[in-house]
Image (cartoon, rainbow, N blue to C red):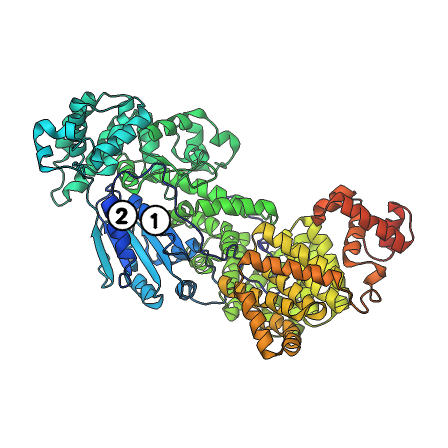
Amino acid sequence: MTDLPSPKPTSAAPVVLRPVPRATPLPESLPVPPTTLVGREREVTEISALLTTDDVRLVTLVGPGGVGKTRLALRVAGGLVDAFREGVVFIGLAHLRDADLVVPTIARALDIRESGGEPLDELLIARLAGRRVLMVLDNLEQVIGVAPCLALLLARCPQTKILATSRETLHLSSEQRYPVPSMSLVSPDTTPADTNPGARFASGAVAGSEAVSLFVQRARAVLPGFALDEASADMVAEICRRVDCLPLGIELAAARLRHLSLASLLHHLDGRLPVLRGGPLDVPDRHRTMHDAIAWSYNLLSPGERAVFRRLAAFSGGFTLGAAAAVALLDAHLRDAAVTGTDPLAPEVISGEPVLDRIASLLDKSLIQIDAAEESTRYGMLETVRAFGLAELDAVGEGDLTRRRLTAWCLALAERSGDGDSGPGQRHWLDRIDRDYANVRAALEWSAEQRDATTLLRLAIALCPFWEEQCHFAEGRYWLEMAAARSDDRSAAERLAITFGIGTMCWLQGEFDLATDWHGRALSFAREAGDRGAEAFALNNLGVQALEAGDFTIAVARCEESLAVARDAGDEAMALQALHNLGHLAWLRGEATRARNVLDDALVLARKLGDTRIIASTLTALGHATINLGDPRSAATLFLESLEIGRHRGNQSTVIDAMEGLARLGAATGPPSAATKVFGAASALRELTHVALSPNELAYLEPSLTALRRALGPDGFATAWERGRTLSTDEAIGEALALAALTTTRPTAGAEQLPSRHGLTAREVEILRLLAAGLGNAEIGERLFISPSTVARHVANIFTKLDVDSRGKAAAYAHRHGLA
C-alpha cells in the first residue's frame, strides 16, 4: 500500500471549529419521474384526503415490488405542496440495510448538521417541530426497525406527517395502512353491458383501462406508430393479465415491442411464466409474478448485457457512465484496474463505447432509468429490478468480485477528495462523494463485513474531510473507531490520521475532554515518528481546545509553538492554520493592533494558498479588529468580501459571521434599528442551522448589543430584533448589504484621523503586499475577487499615500517596512 501523506487539517481549524451548513430552508427534493403517471386518480384522491385529515399522521402505501408505490407517493406528494408549504421532502431508503442509519439519512436529506454534541434525533425533532411538513419515506421494508423512532418523531412534531412506502406495514398505532392495488383492466366508465365479450373494445372497456393505457403509452415510446384495434386490444389485455397488471411488469413487456410483435411477445410470456410460477409456495403470488416478468426480460438480453445489468445492481445509489465502466465492464484492463488499485477514475479507464451501448440497450428495455433530477447524467434501477439483479449476481458467483470493484472505485473517489486540496477543487470532489454517498456507505459496510481492515481504514481516513464538511460527525466517528479497532498493523501515517480523525469528530460533537485526549495521543505519535507537520497540527488543535476550556494562556502558547514547528518544517498550510488562530485569539482578547498584524500575514498566505474558507474567516476577524482601530469603511469592505465568499461557497456559517460583523459595525456607526434587525436575522439563521456562537464570541458582541438596547429601549430593541428574525436568508443578506451601504456613506467622527498602518487602508495593505510579490493587476483582482480596474484605482491611491511613482518603488517600501 502506498504511504499516506502526513495528516493535515482538511477543513481549516479556526479558533472555534463549527459545522458548515449550506442551506437553511427545508430543501425541495421531490424527484422528477422520467414518465407521466397513468391512471391512479382514485388512489391519489383517497391518499391525499387521508394526509389532509387532521388526525391522520402516518400513511403507509403497502404492496409488492413493482406495483407502483413510489410513483404513486410522488404523485400524491407533488399535489400536496400547497397543503404543506413548509416542506414536502422525499427520502429514499432503498440503499439502507441498517435501521440505525435511517435518522442520519433523514437528517442529511433535510440538511441538518450535527453540532455541539446534541443527539442527531433531537436536532431532527428541533428542525421539524412547529413546521407543517410532509416527509415521504420510500422503501421502508428493509429498515422496519426504525418504526419506534418514527413514532417518537411524530409524537414530538405534531404538524409533521409521513407518507411511507413499504412491502409490509410498520405496526404503529398511528399508522393508516393503504394497500396499493394492481392496475385496473376495466375502464372507469365501463357499464354492465360493456362486459359482454363482443362489446369490450367498442366500448373502450379494455382500451380505456389503466393497465392497457399504460402499455400503450410505453409502447409508443419505442414504437411511435403503435395503435390498438380489437385484436391487438385483446392481446395487450392478456399480456397485462400475465404480469398481474403490475405497472413494472407492463413497462418491461411494452419495452420489448422494439424487437417483438405483440403476438411474439405474448408467445414468449406464455412459454416463460408458467414454468417460473412453480417457485416457492410461501412467496406471495404477485412477488413470484414480478420476479418472473423481470426474469423473462433478463433472459432476452445478450450475454454481455446480462453481465453489465447484474453488475450494475451492485450500485446502491445510482451511477454515472464512468462508474459503470469501472465496475461493470467486462474488459480485462478495467477488471485489473479495479482489483489491483489502479485509479478507476482515470480518463483512460472510464472511456469506451461498449458500456454506453449496453446502458443504452438496458434503458430501451426499461431495466435501468435515467435520473432526471440530476444535472449530470446518472442512472439507476428500481429497487425491485435491482434486487433481482443482485440475486443473479450472486447466483453466477460474481458478487464478491463486483463489490470489490465497486469498493475500489469508491476508495479512489474518497482518496481523491481528501488529497489536501482545501480550495474550490475540494468542493467539487466533496460534492461528488455526496452524490455517491449511498455507494460509499455500501463500500464501508462491505469492507467491514469482509473483515478487510486495510480498505476500511483507508476509506475512513479519506472520508474525514467529507464527514467534517457535511457535519456527519456521529457516523464518521462510528466508522473511524471501527477502523481503528480492526487495524492492528498500521503505518505511522495511518495511525496519526485515524487518531486525528477520531479526535476531530469528538471535538465537533462537543466532547472536548475526549478530543484533547486523542489529540494528545496524536502529538506523542507525531513526535515519535519525527513528523513535524503532524506535530504542528496536533499542537494547533490542542491550542484550540484550550481556548474552548477558557485558558487563553495555554491556547496562545500551543498555537505559537505550532507556528514555530510549521515554519521550521516548511509547512505553509499548517503555518496558515496557526497564524489564523493566533490572530483570532488576539482579536478575542481585544488586542486589535496585534490581531491586525497577524491576520494581515494570515490573509496574504491564505490568498497565496487559495484557501477560500480561511480567507473568509480571516477577513471577518480582520474586520472586527479594524473597527477597533477606527477604520469603519475598511471594516465594511472586509466583511462584505467575506459575505460574498460565503455566498459563493454556500457556506452559511461564513455568511452569518459576516452579517454579525456588519451588525456590530452598524451598532457603532449606523442606525440602531437597522443594526438590531441584522443581529436578529443572524440569530434566527444560527438557530436554523444549529451553528451556535461560542461563549468567547458572544462576550465580544455583547457590548454592541447592550449599546443597541440602550439606544432603542427594551421595546424598540425587541421589535427590531423580531423583525430581523422573520426575514428569509436572502432578505437577511439584503438587510446586511443595506446596512453596509449606510455605514460607508454616513460621516464617522474621527475615522479619517485614525488611518490604518502606514496611512493605508486594510485593502490597500493587501494590494501592496501582492504587488510586492510581483503580481499584476489582473492577478491581484483574481486573488481578491475584485476587478482589475478597481485594483488600478487602489494602486494609484497607494502611490499617492506613499509618495512613490512606480510599482518598483512601492514594492521596495513594502519590503523595508515588513509588508512583503
Residue 624 point in image, percent of width and height: 70, 65
Say what amino acid the circle numbered 1 marks: Gly
Residue 107 point in image, percent of width and height: 42, 57
CA separation, marks 2 and 1? 9 Å
Say left or right for 759 vs 787. Answer: right
How many labels were placed on the picture?
Answer: 2
- Which labelled disc corresponds to residue 637? none
Q: Callout 1: 10 Å neighbours few (<14), some, many (20+)? A: some
Residue contact between numbered discs 2 and 1, judged by CB atoms under 8 Å = yes
Quarter of the image holding residue 34? Answer: top left
- Residue carrying label 1: 79
Say what amino acid the circle numbered 2 marks: Val
Closer to us: 353 or 44:
44
Residue found at x 69% / y 72%:
589
Residue found at x 20% / y 24%:
265
- Residue carrying label 2: 44
Say left or right for 245 vs 135. Answer: left
Residue found at x 26% / y 52%:
47
Closer to us: 159 or 282:
159
Asked whether residue 450 appears in the rendered view, the answer is: no
Instruction: Say which element carries label 1.
Output: helix
Instruction: Say which element carries label 2.
Output: helix
Residue 156 point in image, percent of width and height: 35, 68
Asked whether residue 281 appears in the rendered view, the answer is: yes
Quarter of the image holding residue 667? Answer: bottom right
Residue 22 point in image, percent of width and height: 52, 54
Closer to us: 673 or 588:
673
First in sequence: mark 2 or mark 1? 2
